[in-house]
Image (spheres, rainbow, N blue to C red):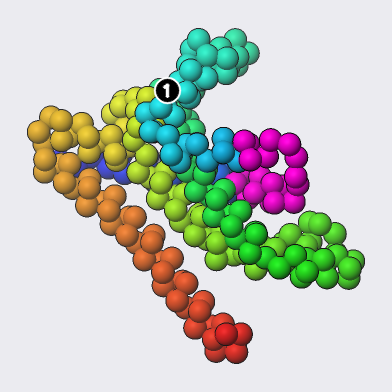
Amino acid sequence: MIEWQPVILSIKVALMSLAIVSIFGISIAYVMRRTEFPGKAAVEALFTMPLVLPPVVTGFLLLILIGKQGPIGRLLSETLHTQVIFTPYAAILAGSVVSFPLMYQSTKAAFQGVDANLEDAARTLGANEWRVFWTVTVPLSWPGLVAGLVLSFARALGEFGATIMVAGNIPGKTQTIPLAIYFAAESNDLTLAGVYVLIISAITFMVIFGLNIWDKSRGRTLSNRGLF
């Protein structure tokens, strides 16, 4: 009998992670695009590291930070009398960290593709930075932002290594689809593992398929308007 809790939790974790990386990814990419400072390359390399590091390594570093003896974990324990480790919040944190580089890189590339002359023209007409961002920068970079959102969601949905390090595999509490697949296969319940594989594959396929359909419809719309 299939248990739907891992499916529901995985979707919740992916959505919450997406919300977090959207805010931080877009904000940081915009700031990094507009500023130059010593060590910028090193900072950007740091932002990208979760993309290339083994997820277990990322999870270990998070465990050092938010574990009971870690600086953040100890602070939460002493001030709020709570902990993040081995809770759904730890799974959200893991999903956010590993998916952030995808959102950041996609957003940065999209922002760099925006013609700075158009932004300067908006400023010349009296628009403040906030209005320039929302009326010029975001609309022109929207395809790249959407691609980053989709990739980040899919990455957070399929996160395994970092999640098991900081959230563990607690059925009914922190067990996501990838964890359910692994432990079902380990217990030789290949049927259950196969069902979860089909579910997560279907969700990922629908998200990417939707992105492709949107991209094609957008291309037809622009073509009909004579923009291409």
| Residue at 22% across, 45% down | 196
Quadrant into which the C terminus falls: bottom right
145 lies above or below 70: below
Quadrant into which the N terminus falls: top left
217 lies above or below 141: below
Q: Secondary structure at mark 1?
A: helix
Pinpoint residue 10: horizontal percent, then vertical percent: 37, 42
Decide if residue 118 is in sight here. yes
Q: Quadrant of residue 142?
A: bottom right
136 lies above or below 59: below
Q: Quadrant of residue 210?
A: bottom left
Pinpoint residue 164: horizontal percent, then vertical percent: 34, 28
Span highlighted in magenta in the image:
23-43
Q: Is residue 91 left or right of residue 70?
A: left
Q: Is residue 37 magenta?
A: yes
Q: Is residue 86 left or right of residue 83?
A: left
Q: Residues within 10 Å of mark 1 (few under 14, many from 20)?
A: some
Decide if residue 12 is in sight here. no
Q: Is residue 39 magenta?
A: yes
Taking depth in this image into account, of 15 and 27 the one nearest to the observer is: 27
| Residue at 69% across, 35% down | 39
Q: Amino acid at mark 1?
A: Phe
Taking depth in this image into account, of 76 and 127 the one nearest to the observer is: 127
- Which residue is label 1 attached to? 60
State the predominant SS element of the stretch in magenta: helix
| Residue at 57% across, 18% down | 72
Q: Is residue 68 left or right of residue 118?
A: left
Pinpoint residue 49: horizontal percent, then vertical percent: 50, 36
Pinpoint residue 202: horizontal percent, then vertical percent: 28, 57
